Image: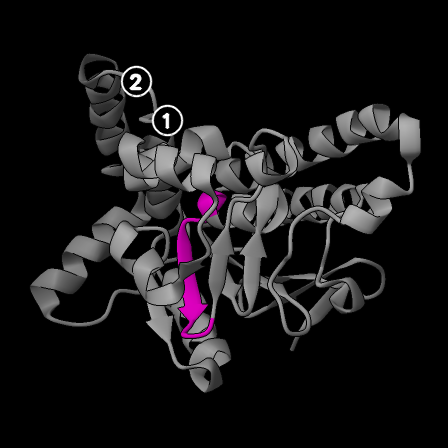
Amino acid sequence: MALPLIDKGPVLLRIEESVAHLTLNRPEAANGMSADLLRALCDAIMVCHGEPGVRAVLLTGAGKNFCAGGDVRDFASKGEALPDYLRQATAYLQQAVAGLIRLNAPVIASVQGFAAGGGGFGLVCAADFVVAAQSAKFLAGATRVAMAPDAGVSVTLPRLVGQRQAMRILLTNPVIEADEALRLGIVTQVVPETELALASQALAHEIAAGAPRALAETKRLLWDGVGRSMEQCLPDEARTVSALSGTADAREGLAAVIERRAPRFVGH
């Protein structure tokens, strides 16, 4: 049974079978990101941090588009106050991205339509898995409107696609089709439009059935490795392996292999 934690407003949140369903909920504006939406997104992500039963997060956008980026009409309405407004909005966006990356639970983004700008493209780059509909399109877009990439994209995108491709994407702003996004490593999987919801949910439940501490520590090691040397990463990796080997889940995993059965992980 789904537990609705946030059931109205620009961001919705419910928890069902250890999966947190996090939905951007401004379909009339292509889920364009205003300061209000970003504040609500930060609050919802913090709720996920505080729910120990959450083993995976499924991030979706209501309507035809995952997220078309910043709400340009909202931005334009601020006039000369725009710089102060954007400082606030960008701070919320950075908090949201950091919150997703630092969640113990892996994050699956399910993308239809456009994922653009710091809002859409940035959240995609901060997710751990991305399932995209065949019709999905990705666009950085910041330099096209004389701004710089935000949402950590200047860090996450080169890690995903390499320096040369990141430079091309961020400076020339191509619209990237789903198949190219898969080839570049921006997305994990491409599926027909009609299969997006089921494929995304299936992946979320597959992840949620795994050993949560092992998945959380592996996710942390991978994200912490961004910008660190091999010499810095290896001791952390060794400590993590040693610590996990003492858990009940590790003993269960070994027993399941020996007994040729599916493991039953409990999270400790």
Please name the amino acid that badge 1 sits on: Asp
Verify CB contact (< 8 Å) between mark 2 and mark 1: yes
Identify the residue shown where x is 76% and y is 34%: 89
Magenta range:
125-135
User: For the residue marked with disc 2, what is the amino acid?
Assistant: Arg
Relative depth, front residue between 266 and 180: 180
Residue 228's tag is 2
- 169 in the magenta segment: no
Q: Residue at x 30, y 41 (%)?
A: 161
Point 79% across, 68% down: residue: 28
Q: What residue occupies the far bottom of the structure in this picture?
A: 194
Q: Residues within 10 Å of mark 1 (few under 14, many from 20)?
A: some
Viewer-side residue, 206 vs 164? 164
Q: Quadrant of residue 19?
A: bottom right
- Figure quadrant of residue 258: bottom left
Residue 96 locus on image (x, y percent): 64, 39
Near-viewer residue (54 or 138): 138
Circle 2 SS class: loop
User: Residue 29, image x and y in percent?
Assistant: 77, 62
Outermost residue, left direction? Answer: 258
- Can residue 160 be seen from the camera position used here? yes
Q: Position of residue 248 (x, y in %)?
A: 31, 48
Crowding at mark 2 (Cα within 10 Å: few <14, some 14-19, many 20+): few
* Nearer to me, 253 or 233: 233
- From the image, which quarter does the N terminus lie in? bottom right
Q: Which residue is mark 1?
A: 224
Please name the colour scheme applied to the rendered image: one colour
Task: Classify 250 as above or below 189.
Answer: above
Q: Is residue 39 above or below residue 63?
A: above
Q: Secondary structure at mark 1?
A: helix
Relative placement, left or right, of 262 versus 195 is: left
Q: Is residue 133 magenta?
A: yes
